[in-house]
Amino acid sequence: MSLDDIKADIKALVAEKSCGPILIRLSWHDAGVYSTGKLTGGCPNAAMRFTDAGEGTFGANAGLPTVALDLLKPITDKYVAAGTISNADLWTLAANVAIESMGGPAIPTRFGRTDAASSAESVESQVGRLPDGDKGTDHLREIFHPKGFTDVDIVALSGAHTVGKCHADRSGFDGKWTEDHLTFSNSYFTEMLAKEYADETTAQGCPQKAHKATGTIML
């Protein structure tokens, strides 16, 4: 059971299930709770595996402990159960492999993350740690500056929305960000600048902007 074996299985999963975007989101939300501001701590430790409390119950993580982990389960059972890799390292590797598989750059993965033993190792709340989709630039700075991000970094990170889409049953927002939502490119930015969007409200009451001709959205 080598690293190449794990990467091959992840590539096969992404190709079969078109699940690259949610694997990226899984890794980002595992690590994204980190903060050094008024809130401290938080780390990529796969605490979302536990749904009795903690990060596995956060609204911002909706769909990750169920959909994402169900997709990864055969690989988890094969490699994590055997002690080859931790869940936290697998989630990071899966995101990096997904990015490359969708046309993005090859990102080296550093290993050594340890798994949470229970939900007690979660951070206390998503508030102040993970962003809300319906808030503006001040909110983004409040969330990301304590993580060490500059404004340029925040914009670059937002570009990851070039892949994936919003699901009404998870976030309340609905629609894909770009026309080719399974290709990793800079289309999030090019489409945002080229298109005219109209305000709309989803069935769940969330305000978003829509490009009617293509069905893409922006927040």
Image: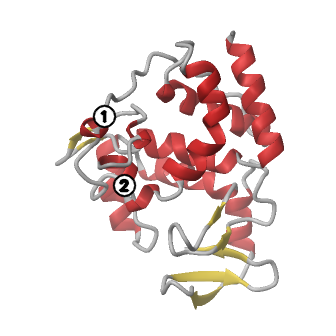
| In the depicted structure, whether residue 216 falls above or below residue 46 | below
| In the depicted structure, whether residue 26 falls above or below residue 218 | above
Query: Which residue matches tag 2?
Result: 57
Of the 4 image quadrants, the one containing the N terminus is top right
Q: Nearer the viewer, residue 18 or 141?
A: 18
Disc 2 residue type (three-letter): Thr
Residue 126: x %, y % from top left: 31, 55
Q: Is there any visible trace of residue 103 in the rendered image?
A: no
Residue at 38%, 48% in the rendered image: 51
- How dense is the environment of label 2, judged by Cα within 10 Å: few (below 14), some, or many (20 and up)? some
Residue at 77%, 49% in the rendered image: 18
Residue at 21%, 45% in the rendered image: 37
Label 1 element class: loop
In the rendered view, does 76 fall on the left or right side of 192? left
Quadrant in which residue 78 is drawn: top right
Of the 4 image quadrants, the one containing the C terminus is bottom right
Q: Find residue 31 and name its label.
A: none
In the rendered view, does 202 fall on the left or right side of 195? left
Residue 201: x %, y % from top left: 55, 89
| Tags 2 and 1 touching, CB below 8 Å | no
Query: Which residue matches tag 1?
Result: 118
| In the depicted structure, whether residue 96 falls above or below residue 206 | above
Residue at 29%, 41% in the rendered image: 122
Label 2 element class: helix
